[in-house]
Image (cartoon, rainbow, N blue to C red):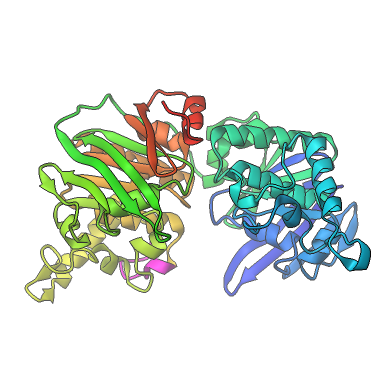
Amino acid sequence: MKLELRGITKRFGALVANDHIDLVVKSGEIHSLLGENGAGKSTLMNVLYGLYSADEGEILLDDVVQNFKGPGDAMAAGIGMVHQHFMLIPVFTVAENVVLGHEPTGALDTLDLEAARKLVREISDRFGFDIDPDALVEDLPVGAQQRVEIIKALARDAKVLVLDEPTAVLTPQETDELMAIMKGLAKAGTSIVFITHKLREVQAVADRITVIRLGAVVGDAKPTDSASTLATMMVGRAVDLDVKKHSPKKGDAGLTVTNLTVVGDRHNKVVDDVSFTVHAGEVLAIAGVQGNGQTELAEALVGLRDVTGGKIVLGKLDITDSTVREVIDAGVGYIPEDRSKDGLVGDFTIAENFMVNRSYGPPFAKGLSIDFVNRARIADELITEYDVRTPSQTTLAKQLSGGNQQKVVVARELSRDLNLLIASQPTRGVDVGSIEFIHERIIATRDAGKPVVIISTELDEVSALADRIAVMYRGKIVGIVDATTSRETLGRMMAGATA
């Protein structure tokens, strides 16, 4: 089925999320929609799927204009969408999830589970998905859950399949398996729209590429184009994707974690007997698929989560049971994974956000009063040094782009005299140009002789920044390896194999 979007425009108040976008996806083609986070890719696909209505423009399938009132109309017309966050019911079986909403019925209108199982087996066998229809979804690994989502779409006879950031929660091996599935689907005639910001994946699987920047199409590209060419199109300027760093000059132990155990919200061990050491002047990256205890580990290190067992020592100072303020005063900088929730106060100005964790003393306060003159001077200096794109220091943080919000957090944390930097998903939701800048600053912190802990689900980022890599799986560290370790080996470790 051929898909065509003509002049699609979608506004949210004064914000133009999609600006007269034209897109053609041919039958049996893998068409990548490439752009930075916030470029308008997902909004465009939500218009296609009937979740949003366009303010202008039209959608055509095989040259016939469509008028979708909701996702039901889109599905009936042959559009399927696999969202970044899966829409599955964990306690249902695969078969029950696949037919939910359009259940096959038998005698007396009862659910015909055998027909549901047969449907799952047919699709699974046709595309080599290897999915048991009777398996509970909650017992399946993430990659298999994603295949269930694809089966759901195909069971509704999807001719156009939209995959929205489909590799965000996958190991490298699961990513390779998904790409093989995409190629098989395309060969069988399914048109695929592949939404991503990951250049490596686009180059590996796409037939054609459309690049979106700031809500508008800026051009088409070929998968044979270089990563730097694609990045330049995404950002609008030349970008150096290589992280430049020398061999580490390691000093004494800066952070020592011994047998650390943390219990989660469901009273299960989310960090299970974890031990590692980070030396001054080195970067230790904690790698793993999202949800394997990395978030809770970072929160425990900075005092945001109680420690059940074990010890955290900063230099020679035991901070195991310290409060967040005590940890900060001990010289720990923290870049949280969710800047909106934990890193910034959206209704505060940039200048106010620079001082939120140091409002009780120099250089931002004198006694019980804020030193407004000093704060203004420091804010202007940090805005310039960290290239925060803003009209002024009085701009509210929520009015900044994601990349500039992250720069405010990075500037605040790195402008202090640190004894340790903990950066959790430091470039999540950040444009390619800002990624380049943030990486440079992290390496500069390491080269200044500080211990650095990076927590990231992006293997390219892990390999680029790390001197050593610790891989977490189900709350445990399955191994600590050198930064030159192959993606294949790291992928196996992320699935639970020991080093």
Q: Is residue 347 above or below residue 268?
A: below
Q: Is residue 153 left or right of residue 484?
A: right
Residue 13: in sight, yes or no? yes
Let me know if residue 392 is in the magenta part: yes
In the displayed structure, does residue 313 sit left or right of residue 16?
left
Q: Residue at x 43, y 37 (%)?
A: 461
Q: Quadrant of residue 268?
A: bottom left
Q: Is residue 429 left or right of residue 221?
A: left
Q: Position of residue 202 (x, y in %)?
A: 63, 37
Let me know if residue 391 is in the magenta part.
yes
Task: Decide: is 493 above or below 331.
Answer: above
* Residue closest to the eye, 188 or 394: 188
Query: Where are the magenta residues, as a range?
Result: 390-398
The answer to whether any part of residue 389 appears in the image is: no
Q: Residue at x 13, y 48 (%)?
A: 318
Q: Position of residue 355 (x, y in %)?
A: 22, 65
Residue 264 lies, in percent from the top left, at 38, 57
